[in-house]
Image (tube, helix red, strand yellow):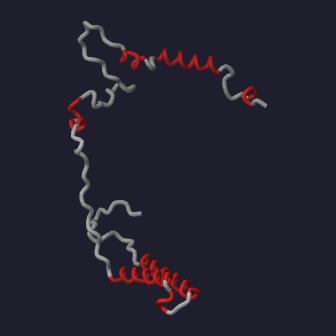
């Protein structure tokens, strides 16, 4: 039941095939640059240390170690030096329709918790309270804007 022995889509000797692939890559010179970068120059040799080279022959991307002045703020020793976000903009004023919908939801909660205040029993007050709360939530949903704010300008970014 071993499907590996019966398989014909791969080489019979995986180790020999792997050794052939590695030998082919070594003949092409793959991996030699990384070895040359790790070799230290002789003491008498005052040439610049070699930089890693991309396979296309272009120099590799510079890092902070290559040019210490490239990132002057990265070595800040001040523990209090951190990002302070700006104050958020104020909330917009509530419109009368929004206030009325919120009052409906509040009335529904009061009616649900204390139906006796309105002279109702729990059997009548509970469904009525749920209807009032759902009406207030529905009114809020229907009042939601689906357009950008009037002061957003011509470039309003992605609209979902």
Horizontal side of 83 relative to 113 (left or right) equals: left
- In the picture as drawn, the residue positioned furthest to the top comes out as 44
| Residue drawn at 23 percent across, 45 percent down | 80
Q: How many marks do you count on the picture?
A: 0
- In the picture as drawn, the residue positioned furthest to the right comes out as 1
* Along the viewing direction, whichever of 105 and 56 lies nearer the viewer: 105
Q: Which part of the image, by quadrant, shows the C terminus?
A: bottom left
Position above or below: 109 against 31: below
| Residue drawn at 45 percent across, 78 percent down | 137
Position above or below: 44 against 79: above
- In the picture as drawn, the residue positioned furthest to the bottom comes out as 119
Position above or below: 87 against 104: above
Inspect this view and state whether residue 135 appears.
no
| Residue drawn at 34 percent across, 60 percent down | 157
Counting from the top left corner in percent of width and height, residue 78 is at: 21, 40
| Residue drawn at 44 percent across, 84 percent down | 107
Inspect this view and state whether residue 104 appears.
yes
Position above or below: 125 against 76: below
Horizontal side of 66 relative to 28 (left or right) equals: left
Counting from the top left corner in percent of width and height, residue 2 is at: 76, 29
Horizontal side of 15 relative to 67 (left or right) equals: right
Counting from the top left corner in percent of width and height, residue 62 is at: 29, 30
Q: Which part of the image, by quadrant, shows the N terminus?
A: top right
Quarter where residue 58 is shown: top left
Quarter where residue 7 is shown: top right
Counting from the top left corner in percent of width and height, residue 14 is at: 64, 21
* Along the viewing direction, whichever of 91 and 70 lies nearer the viewer: 91
């Amino acid at each position: 039941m071993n499907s590996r022995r019966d398989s014909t889509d791969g080489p019979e000797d995986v180790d020999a095939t792997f050794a052939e692939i590695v030998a082919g890559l070594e003949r092409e010179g793959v991996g030699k640059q990384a070895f040359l970068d790790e070799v230290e120059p002789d003491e008498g040799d005052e040439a610049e240390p070699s930089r890693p080279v991309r396979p296309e022959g272009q120099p590799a991307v510079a890092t902070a170690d290559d040019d210490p002045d490239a990132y002057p703020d990265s070595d800040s020793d001040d523990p209090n030096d951190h990002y302070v976000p700006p104050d958020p903009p104020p909330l917009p004023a509530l419109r009368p329709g929004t206030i009325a919908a919120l009052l409906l939801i509040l009335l529904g909660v009061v009616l649900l918790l204390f139906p006796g205040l309105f002279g109702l029993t729990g059997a009548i007050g509970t469904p009525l309270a749920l209807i009032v709360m759902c009406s207030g939530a529905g009114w809020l949903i229907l009042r939601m804007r689906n357009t950008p704010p009037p002061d957003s300008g011509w470039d309003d970014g992605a609209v979902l």
